Image: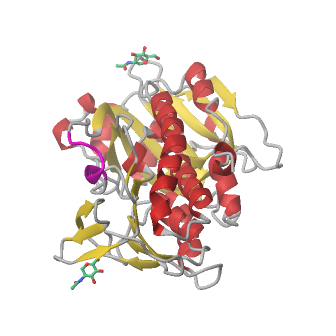
Amino acid sequence: MTRTSSNAIEVAIVGGGIAGLAAAAFLRKYPQYNITIFERRREDDEEHSSGLALRDGGKAIMKKLGITREEVGASPGAGYRTYTINEDLLAESRLPEGSDGDSPMWLLSRGDLKDALFRRATSEDGKGKPAKIVYNSHIVRVDPDTGTIHFANATSIHADLIIGADGIHSKVRSAIIPESHPQPAPCGISLYRFMLPMETFENAVKAGDHTPVMFQFNEDESFILMVAATDGSNCTLCCYPCEGHKTMNVACGIFDSSAQTPEELEYSWQAKGKKEELKAIYHMFPEWFTRVLDQVPEVALFQIRDQDPLPIYFKHQTVLIGDAAHAILPLGAQGANQALEDAEGLDALLADVTDVNKISDRLALWDSIRRPRAAATQRTARGFESVLSSKANQDKVLASKPFVEMRVLAGM
Ligand SMILES: *[C@@H]1O[C@H](CO)[C@@H](O)[C@H](O)[C@H]1NC(C)=O
Ligand SMILES: *[C@@H]1O[C@H](CO)[C@@H](O)[C@H](O)[C@H]1NC(C)=O
């Protein structure tokens, strides 16, 4: 279909997570784009939050969107630190200080990040037209040949650009990737996750006057803190502050094989775990662990899935971003960063497109640059499952390629 450049370009974003909201936040400033986000959740659905880390790329992209560390309540992160359950420091890996005077990492909650992106994408202030969001949108199928999205309520819409940001269980992906490509598969590790008010956490780990040395936090410099059992079980607790240092984000790794019902494990933020099971698996941890768990109303249990790098991220005018394109093991603190880099790339390459017939070429250029970089990050994150707590692996995670703007990579 040929259209004149004066027509608005209809953009449909499938999924209102970090990737989808970031793409909307970037693209809304261009007057040619009419953006609608189709989100599966209902507007008033409660979402489980959890912590995440933004590295140099994520931080740079936040700044491009005018989002400050204060706005998202991020704690200044310096790197990784591992202690044994006996309070001995096993390993410390630091990221180099940035030249911008900011800490090398931001430690924050998914909820705070999404809220900030949502404001940038949908607020009446700001350049261009705010993105619209349609909740309770259930997608059945996307047809890239015609640019059509089919919904479960038997309606369909046409869009000039379809951005599939619908996560690891993406419906859009199956319209682009042959069914013969391996589906995301369990890698043998699950994470128990919960968040606790910082004060509650600090009171729980304290015994009398003694606060275990690893929990003596410095608000000006936080670490992704690992506490590792030394008995060969590889039980490792990972925690760090977020939400303006008011919340502690905690994850406890387990092997799927140690769960009572491994066949029930899910890749879902909503899946619940059993505290008693976690206590039993982490029986070698000191008393403070039990006291912390006693304060937690409910724990989530999240099975980590690994996706083989995809052979392509786009077809015609439909493109995959975020976890839909490159689901990644969460252990290298890269998932949100990769999603944000996808959006920053679309921003650079779609800025001056006013003719819908040019979209496909720009997506091809975006794909040729983003796909190898994201795939390399996916591969690096593999193999850390059980032993991220070692100094060598921590250093390897932190040594990942520095962020480079799409404009530079594309030679624009
Ligand atoms: C069907 O779902 C789509 C996507 O959520 C929505 O835009 C549309 O209004 C719905 N139509 C009806 C008739 O419910
Ligand atoms: C536990 O970690 C060690 C390294 O510290 C590793 O050699 C071993 O394979 C891990 N155990 C399992 C079951 O993965």
Quadrant assignment for the N terminus = bottom left
User: Seen in the image, is 251 located left or right of residue 369?
Assistant: left
- Which residue extends farthest bottom? 124
Task: Residue at 50% x, 66% y: name it.
Answer: 21
Quarter of the image for residue 222 reads top right
Q: Nearer the viewer, residue 315 or 168?
A: 315
State whether residue 189 is above or below residue 344: above
Q: Which residues are magenta?
A: 173-179
Residue 175 among magenta residues = yes
State whether residue 95 is above or below residue 352: above
Callout count: 0
Q: Position of residue 295 (x, y in %)?
A: 43, 54
State whether residue 398 is above or below residue 44: above
Q: Nearer the viewer, residue 92 or 337?
A: 337
Q: Position of residue 276 (x, y in %)?
A: 28, 43
Residue 406 among magenta residues = no
Task: Residue at 55% x, 57% y: name it.
Answer: 346
On the question of residue 114 being in view, the answer is: no
Quarter of the image for residue 329 reads top left
User: Seen in the image, is 144 located left or right of residue 59?
Assistant: left
Colour setting = secondary structure
Indicate the quadrant of ligand 1 in the picture: bottom left
Task: Residue at 62% x, 36% y: name it.
Answer: 214
Q: Position of residue 130 (x, y in %)?
A: 54, 80
User: Seen in the image, is 260 located left or right of residue 255?
Assistant: left
Q: Position of residue 94 (x, y in %)?
A: 70, 32
On the question of residue 319 being in view, the answer is: yes
Q: Nearer the viewer, residue 286 or 165?
A: 165
